[in-house]
């Protein structure tokens, strides 16, 4: 049982949350805006079209419903943990108290996929929409400035990859711009985020209302296209699409990373988590319906599908409004993703698992500024080289694993600390097996996360068979770096281990 040793107690977690040094200035609506701002991003502006064209067809609507149900179970689990343990670090901190330091490191490393690498996909979407917007104003950007170096071979990633002489410098630059706003402080950056999110939601609602009149029933028939491959269309394609867009829902989880900066975290954080998930799901389903109803789904495998839908609707004035909203909106998503990842690294550095430079606060703005800059530069470089298709699968895989551990943590805490005050509890209760409490909601969350993981693994293996080892290779390299990072730095510098040795 050594693997489960060295856990933080709830008392330690509470003590850490009181001495974090971050400014407590976020109310329930700002927290909700953080969640919505992170969720309404690359998933809706880019990956909706890709998932419909390659995997689900019009049944992408069912994929969104499946993904949202999976996230609902996890969101309720997050709500209970956030109300009980109102601290920054999100799933990382929760895992530290239940499964121990090794699992906490694993979750922290998975969250880098969920937030840090997710910012890469958002930057890629920003690049595509901004280039398309500039083209409308007769400003043409050379392709070598906005395409990543790695590209799919003709016929898709299942046929291999090719290297081209280009770098996505537009996407990389957008990461650095978002970083500048973030460095000025959480209060200022969340105010900017709230304004941008309101604009983004308004434009998307306008897109849904106007697009409803252009839906053609023939584009929705057949609703579930016949299968053309192991994970292409049919029932399996629906689940494959759900696993692809699963990462699009991570915004609600970003709310829990802001617990240390919330005014009343035990009430406001659960509210922000559930409210942001509900709002985002309604917008996702509405936009997906318009996309597959207006445009034949096979034509949606492009980086700016909403712009194509507007072309089909013949509304040039709405086109530049939507593209402008996408460009500005994706910036806000990057802002939230960078914010969340920098706070997770901040807590990990405070625990000694990462170098102390990631927990060094700016003397005026009280933000972990050096760590944020290092993180942003790494994300910008990755954006220049890697494409969104591979990135999205890695993000969904990391997200699913982290979410599953969070659901298990609820079960663990209920059994180890049954009597602590829980301002918010997962609904519907649970059952007992040999005096071990097992909640219905957490179990459903774990099963749903496994359902999201399975199609991703199958697709990676299928790509390997078809001479494209890159997805599995990236996952292997990422895992190896994580293992070496813990055993050669984190374990040796862990503050919890040092205190126990004394």
Image (tube, grey):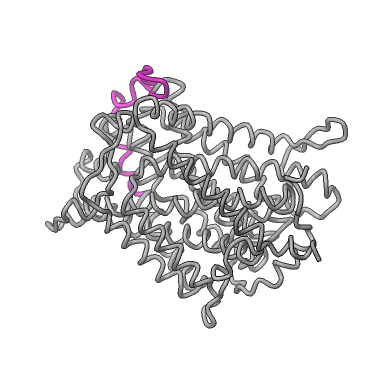
Q: In the rendered view of the protein, which quadrant contains the N terminus?
A: top right
Q: Nearer the viewer, residue 177 or 211?
A: 177
Q: Nearer the viewer, residue 119 or 355?
A: 355
The residue that appears at 29% across and 32% down in the rendered structure is: 156
Q: Does the magenta-highlighted stretch encompass residue 230?
A: yes
Q: Residue furthest left?
A: 138
Q: Position of residue 364 (x, y in %)?
A: 52, 82
Q: Position of residue 62 (x, y in %)?
A: 46, 30
Q: Residue furthest bottom?
A: 364
Q: Which residues are magenta?
A: 205-232
Q: Residue furthest front?
A: 488
Q: Is residue 236 above or below residue 327?
A: above
The residue that appears at 75% across and 54% down in the rendered structure is: 7
Q: Position of residue 64 (x, y in %)?
A: 47, 36
In the figure, is residue 23 to the left or right of 217? right
Q: In the rendered view of the protein, which quadrant contains the C terminus?
A: bottom right
Q: Position of residue 365 (x, y in %)?
A: 52, 78
In the figure, is residue 87 to the left or right of 481? right
Q: Is residue 32 above or below residue 389?
A: below
């Amino acid at each position: 049982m050594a693997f489960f040793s060295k856990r933080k107690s709830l008392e330690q977690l509470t003590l850490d949350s009181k001495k974090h040094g971050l400014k407590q200035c976020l109310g329930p609506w700002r927290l909700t805006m953080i969640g919505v701002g992170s969720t309404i991003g690359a998933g809706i502006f880019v990956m909706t079209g890709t998932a419909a064209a390659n995997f689900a067809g019009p049944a992408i609507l069912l994929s969104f419903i499946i993904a949202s149900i999976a996230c609902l179970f996890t969101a309720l689990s997050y709500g209970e943990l956030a109300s009980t343990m109102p601290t920054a670090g999100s799933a990382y901190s929760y895992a530290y108290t239940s499964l121990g330091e090794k699992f906490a490191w694993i979750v922290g490393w998975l969250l880098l996929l969920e937030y840090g690498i997710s910012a890469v996909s958002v930057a890629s979407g920003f690049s595509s929409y901004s280039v398309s917007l500039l083209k409308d104003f007769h400003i043409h950007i050379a392709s070598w400035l906005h395409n990543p170096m790695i590209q799919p071979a003709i016929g898709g990633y299942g046929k291999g990859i090719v290297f081209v002489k280009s770098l996505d410098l537009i996407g990389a630059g957008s990461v650095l711009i978002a970083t500048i706003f973030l460095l000025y402080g959480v209060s200022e950056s969340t105010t900017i985020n709230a304004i941008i999110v309101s604009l983004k939601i308004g434009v998307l609602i306008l897109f849904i209302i106007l697009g409803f009149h252009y839906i053609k029933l023939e584009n929705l028939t057949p609703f579930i296209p016949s299968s053309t491959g192991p994970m292409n269309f049919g029932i399996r394609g629906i689940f494959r699409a759900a696993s692809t867009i699963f990462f699009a829902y991570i915004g609600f989880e970003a709310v829990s990373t802001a617990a240390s900066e919330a005014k009343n975290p035990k009430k406001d954080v659960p509210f922000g988590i559930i409210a942001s998930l509900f709002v985002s799901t309604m917008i996702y389903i509405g936009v997906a319906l318009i996309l597959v109803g207006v445009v034949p789904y096979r034509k949606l495998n492009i980086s700016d599908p909403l712009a194509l839908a507007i072309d089909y609707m013949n509304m040039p004035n709405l086109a530049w409004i939507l593209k402008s909203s996408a460009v500005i909106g994706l910036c806000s998503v990057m802002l939230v993703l960078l914010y969340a990842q920098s706070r997770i690294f901040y807590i990990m550095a405070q625990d000694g698992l990462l170098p102390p430079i990631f927990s060094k606060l700016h003397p005026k703005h009280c933000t972990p500024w050096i760590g944020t800059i290092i993180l942003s530069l790494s994300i910008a470089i990755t954006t220049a080289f890697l494409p969104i298709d591979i990135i999205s699968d890695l993000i969904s895989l990391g997200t699913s694993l982290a979410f599953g551990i969070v659901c298990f943590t609820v079960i663990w805490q209920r059994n180890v600390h049954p009597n602590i005050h829980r301002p918010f509890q997962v609904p519907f209760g649970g059952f007992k097996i040999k005096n071990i409490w097992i909640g219905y909601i957490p179990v459903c969350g774990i099963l749903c996360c496994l359902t999201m993981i399975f199609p991703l693994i199958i697709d990676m293996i299928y790509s390997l068979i078809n001479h494209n080892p890159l997805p599995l290779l990236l996952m292997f390299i990422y895992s190896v770096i994580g293992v070496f990072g813990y055993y050669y730095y984190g374990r040796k510098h862990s503050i919890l281990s040092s205190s126990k040795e004394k």
